[in-house]
Image: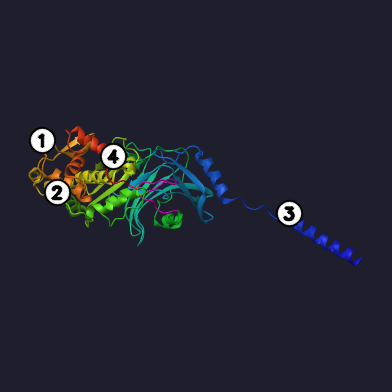
């Protein structure tokens, strides 16, 4: 009887506790789920619209990657699906992979949504770089530049509806494109304040996979961040053989390497970046771009397919070819700035600047072949001293001399296809 009574008491307690639990107030809805629902309601966003946030490249909102700072401040990560890089103040390409976030701030019982894009140049002693802010509802934009966490320049009130809009340009999948000056969206929004270093510290992008660099996108193979202390910059991640070739070139004993070192090595004012582009025609090995008239931050874009199968000698020749364009341009600009422009033809006989497919190039005719072309052949031979003088000269002529012999053309094709020369293992 005592056992039965004890069992009944325990059962009564259990039932009472269960009934008490069922009377507890409902748990508040998941903050992120509620925020997502509100965002979609206010903006009309649909996950299939990958150009909703930026018209020039594709993104997706990663609601699972978020930072809940308080009841009224939340950050949500935006995945960049294309390869996108913005230019830093010194014309370097900075990837915005992991650098785009939505900031949600609750004011007057309503959420306001701001798109933040960070373009960090250095964060060792405080944020240095650009921060772009855009109201998702109104389209109004703010752009600010900070040095060591302090605001030094700001452009306020860049109205998307203005007829005289200021746009920000960047590199999208290897092509120059407008990054930000979208048309306004319908709805109301609280303008709030532009993004600042505190936002960068709050989301801590480096914790979320790093800044990327170059032009890598989320979920894709990115490129390493360019270092402002380097002048001959290796941005050839994923092509180890080409990286090894590039690392060797500045240390070779030849006139071209000496020229390049004199302009780009240990010179913070000039930089030359070697990068891979996926938008080069199959028959083109690469191209050089001075990016701006001063040519202080030049880039050499290379065909990834060529780098994957060509001989090391052919890769070295391509590097030397394109870098020589950069050196000659730099010398031409220097002489013109010193009022000695007429001396260019004397110092570099036979070479002349010309526009080839809207690119400023330096070419030389076979009939006026000068010492500089032999210097280029000697540079290629210094990479592989066992190569014959004739073969080195044939590789030097490709892309520079317009009237090569058929034997020289065939030799270049064999090297390009990896059928001759030192293979990349």
Q: Mark 2 highlights which residue?
A: 334
Residue displayed at 27% across by 56% down: 230
Q: Give the CA separation, mark 4 to mark 2.
A: 34 Å
- Specify which label sits upstream in the sequence, 3 or 1: 3
- Specify which label sits upstream in the sequence, 2 or 1: 2
Q: Residue furthest right?
A: 1
Measuring from the top left, give residue 369's x and y in whole percent: 11, 39
Badge 4 local density, few (<14 within 10 Å), some, or many (20+)? many
Residue 26 in sight: yes
- Specify which label sits upstream in the sequence, 4 or 3: 3
Measuring from the top left, give residue 152's x and y in whole percent: 31, 55
Q: Mark 4 highlights which residue?
A: 416
In the picture, measured across the screen, residue 146 lies left or right of residue 42, that is left
Instruction: Identify the element where label 4 is drawn.
Output: helix
The residue segment tinted magenta is 209-222
- Specify which label sits upstream in the sequence, 4 or 1: 1
Measuring from the top left, give residue 133's x and y in whole percent: 40, 48
Mark 3 vs mark 1: in front: 1
Mark 2 vs mark 1: in front: 1
Badge 1 local density, few (<14 within 10 Å), some, or many (20+)? few
Q: Are marks 3 and 2 in contact (CB under 8 Å)?
A: no
Measuring from the top left, give residue 201's x and y in whole percent: 42, 58
Q: Mark 1 highlights which residue?
A: 367
The image quarter containing residue 389 is top left
In the picture, measured across the screen, residue 261 lies left or right of residue 176, that is left
Residue 1, placed above or below residue 346: below
Q: Are marks 4 and 1 in contact (CB under 8 Å)?
A: no
Q: Mark 3 highlights which residue?
A: 22
């Amino acid at each position: 009887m005592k056992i039965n009574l004890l069992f009944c008491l325990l059962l009564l307690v259990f039932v009472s506790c269960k009934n008490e639990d069922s009377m507890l107030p409902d748990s508040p809805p998941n903050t992120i789920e509620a925020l997502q629902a509100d965002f979609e309601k206010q903006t009309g966003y649909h996950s299939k619209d990958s150009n909703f946030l930026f018209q020039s490249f594709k993104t997706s909102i990663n609601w699972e990657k978020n930072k809940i700072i308080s009841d009224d401040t939340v950050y949500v990560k935006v995945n960049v699906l294309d390869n996108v890089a913005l230019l830093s103040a010194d014309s370097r390409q900075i990837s915005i992979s992991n650098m785009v976030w939505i900031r949600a701030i609750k004011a007057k019982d309503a959420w306001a949504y701001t798109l933040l894009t960070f373009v960090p140049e250095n964060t060792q002693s405080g944020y240095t770089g650009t921060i772009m802010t855009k109201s998702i509802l109104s389209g109004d934009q703010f752009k600010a530049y900070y040095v060591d966490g302090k605001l030094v320049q700001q452009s306020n009130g860049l109205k998307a509806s203005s007829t005289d809009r200021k746009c920000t340009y960047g590199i999208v999948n290897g092509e120059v494109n407008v990054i930000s000056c979208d048309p306004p969206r319908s709805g109301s929004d609280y303008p709030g304040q532009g993004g600042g270093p505190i936002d960068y510290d709050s989301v801590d992008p480096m914790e979320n996979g790093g800044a990327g660099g170059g032009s890598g996108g989320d979920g894709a193979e990115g490129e390493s961040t360019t270092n402002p202390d380097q002048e001959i910059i290796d941005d050839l991640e994923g092509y180890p053989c080409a990286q090894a070739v590039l690392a060797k070139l500045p240390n070779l004993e030849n006139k071209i390497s000496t020229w390049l070192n004199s302009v780009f090595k240990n010179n913070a004012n000039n930089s030359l970046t070697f990068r891979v582009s996926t938008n080069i025609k199959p028959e083109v090995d690469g191209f050089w771009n001075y990016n701006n008239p001063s040519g202080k931050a030049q880039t050499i874009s290379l065909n990834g397919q060529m780098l994957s199968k060509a001989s090391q000698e052919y890769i070295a020749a391509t590097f030397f070819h394109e870098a020589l364009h950069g050196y000659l341009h730099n010398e031409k600009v220097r002489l013109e700035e010193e009022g000695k422009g007429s001396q260019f033809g004397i110092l570099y006989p036979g070479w002349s600047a010309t526009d080839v497919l809207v690119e400023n190039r330096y070419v030389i005719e076979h009939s006026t072949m000068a010492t500089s072309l032999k210097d280029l052949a000697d540079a290629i031979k210094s990479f592989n001293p066992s190569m014959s003088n004739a073969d080195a000269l044939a590789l030097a002529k490709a892309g520079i001399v317009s009237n090569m012999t058929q034997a020289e053309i065939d030799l270049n094709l064999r090297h390009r296809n990896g059928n001759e020369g030192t293979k990349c293992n």
